[in-house]
Amino acid sequence: MPESIQDKKKLILRIISRYTSTLRQIAVGDYRDQLAQSNTELRIRYHVTELLDGLRKTLAENIPDINDEEYSTKLQSGIAEMRGR
């Protein structure tokens, strides 16, 4: 540990600078820092991309085929039931 106040301030600035630089890189998916390269749990962009891909797949599976005759029939009957409410 540094002894003088000036050296302690310099150390704190270096630590904060490295932290913010690494955080910025991780957020945009630019993993130049050795810490981000070696710790996959720090790769925020990777995790967000994984979550968005899962959401996209789930939505795609639940979107009805609007050209399907059965869907059209169900939609028309649903609309007819709601008339007058």
Image (cartoon, grey):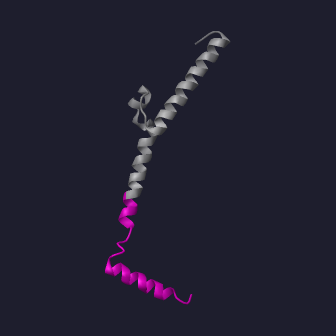
Residue appearing at x 44%, y 42% in the figure: 45
Give left or right: position of 55 versus 19: left
Q: Residue at x 37, y 84 (%)?
A: 73
Extent of the magenta region? 57-85
- Residue 25 point in image, percent of width and height: 47, 33
Residue 80 as seen in the image, left or right of residue 2: left
Looking at the rendered image, the quarter that the C terminus falls into is: bottom right
The image quadrant of residue 46 is top left
Residue lying farthest to the front in this orientation: 67
Q: Where residue 36 sits: x, y (%)?
A: 43, 31
Numbered circles on residues, count: 0
- Horizontal side of residue 35 vs 68, given as left or right: right
Quarter of the image that includes the N terminus: top right
Residue 68 belongs to magenta span: yes
Above or below: residue 65 compared with residue 52: below
Extreme-right residue of the structure: 5
Name the dominant secondary structure of the magenta segment: helix
Q: Where is residue 20 in the image (x, y as percent from the top left)?
A: 55, 30
| Quarter assignment of residue 17 | top right
In the rendered view, would you say 14 is above or below 29?
A: above
1, above or below 40, in the image: above
Identify the residue at image location x=41%, y=26%.
Answer: 34
Residue visible at 39% across and 68% down in the picture: 63
Furthest toward the bottom, the residue is 84
Instruction: Report the front residue among 47 and 24.
Output: 24
Per the image, is 33 magenta?
no
